[in-house]
Amino acid sequence: MLEIIAKKRDHGELTADEINDFIEGYTSGRIPDYQASALLMSIYLNGMNFNEASHLAMAMRDSGERLNWPAELGPLIDKHSTGGVGDKISLILAPVVAACGLTDPMIAGRGLGHTGGTLDKLESIPGFRVDLTATELHAALLKSKIVINGATGSLAPADKKLYALRDVTGTVASIPLIASSIMSKKLAAGINGLVMDVKCGQGAFMKQLPAAQELARTLVRIGQNAGVKMTAVITNMDAPLGLAIGNSLEVKEALAVLHGQGPKDIRQLTLALAAHMLVLGNKAKTFKQAYQRAGQTLNDGSAFAAFRQMVTVQGGDTRYVDRPELFPVSQQQVTITAAKSGYLAAIDSYQLGMAVVKMGGGRLIKGTPIKHQVGIVLAKKVSTAIQKGDLLATVHCEGIDDDLLIEIQNAFQITAAPVTAEPLILDTINS
């Protein structure tokens, strides 16, 4: 292991055997955290070429079992996001495609750095299980066509260990580590197609478009090599998605969208990603046709019904789905108001994401419990005209210090001149 660390430290290319040896050793416990951390930092600083990233993805895929699904489920098409602030798309998207007849065994993750985690959000619903076994996954899919679950203990166990270690060692924002982590779980899950939502901007791990495009191409190529149909959509994360940031707050916003309400950007991105999934799964011939079909499920209630069915199958208390006011609320709600008039030119999504983490809505230390009720709810979106004293956001907290409130206040940039919001979808890369 020392030789492998030194080789990557000195910009060398790791062989498939060296990568396999590292993954086997770390998964079994033979290689300790401190050596794995050293290699992760070497990869973060010096990178990996495509062959190394592909070998790493396959090694992590093969570190545990690989799921196989009954043929009657049809093509299995999934979606994955590289992580954003306010990104509750999966909670809406999975029910939408299920209502259109598509099957999706979604293997999701927890919060990573400043970004929220789909599993943490779903665990806001009392009783909701994200630890279904392979047998339970089969049964759940047969009943509801969708399931959102964590990687089982036997599914890509190497990635599960490395994922947690990256979160606390400053090695998250690495293209080969992100790509191999995502694809190891997705390939082990036995899917036939995958739509990637690659975030780009201030609140994303990829801050600039060229880096996001490189990550998208890496993901697509790894999937292609494994025989999986791929589409990568690069989306804007300079500002938070929707209005709610924080676990149970985002679940409530997702429920609003499932009832045909909620923020327009959430609906737009959900339907765009759903359309790509439906085309990959042969449920529609064109993107336009698929987009319209997906939108109908939000209007006629069938997507909400699919979400409710998923919650039932995974053990969640559907009373919270039917009556979102039952979700616990934080002890305090503190308002953030505009210090001057003008136009809301920018909202620093990274700063707001980190503020929610510091309030307990995410993790600074591996294994820390989550406070599901804390978060931030925006009152304005970028490009809106602002008057001095207008409400910008409400902070839901369990006690908060003045320094953190100042950080949140400073996340809102107000200018005298009007601004135009950037487009939500920046690029699309297909197989």
Image (cartoon, rainbow, N blue to C red):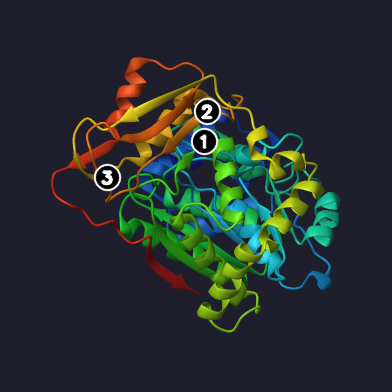
Q: How many marks?
A: 3
Horizontal and vertical percent position of residue 215: 42, 58
Q: Which residue is mark 2?
A: 374
Horizontal and vertical percent position of residue 311: 75, 47
Mark 3–mark 2 distance (CA, rounded to whole Å): 23 Å
Q: Is residue 209 left or right of residue 48?
A: left
Horizontal and vertical percent position of residue 412: 28, 37
Q: Amino acid at mark 3?
A: Ala
Q: Which residue is mark 1?
A: 246
Helix, strand or loop status at disc 3: strand
Label 1 or label 2, whichever comes before in sequence order: 1
Q: Is residue 202 left or right of residue 72?
A: left
Cβ–Cβ under 8 Å for marks 3 and 1: no
Q: Residue at x 60, y 59 (%)?
A: 93
In the foreground, 288 or 320: 320
Q: Amino acid at mark 1?
A: Gly
Mark 1–mark 2 distance (CA, rounded to whole Å): 6 Å
Q: Residue at x 54, y 82 (%)?
A: 286
Mark 3–mark 1 distance (CA, rounded to whole Å): 20 Å
Label 3 or label 1, whichever comes before in sequence order: 1
Q: Which residue is mark 3?
A: 346
Label 3 or label 2, whichever comes before in sequence order: 3
Cβ–Cβ under 8 Å for marks 3 and 2: no
- Can residue 289 be seen in this snapshot? yes
Q: Amino acid at mark 2?
A: Val
> Which part of the image, by quadrant, shows the N terminus?
top right
In the foreground, 344 or 365: 344
Helix, strand or loop status at disc 1: loop
Cβ–Cβ under 8 Å for marks 1 and 2: yes
Q: Residue furthest bottom?
A: 285
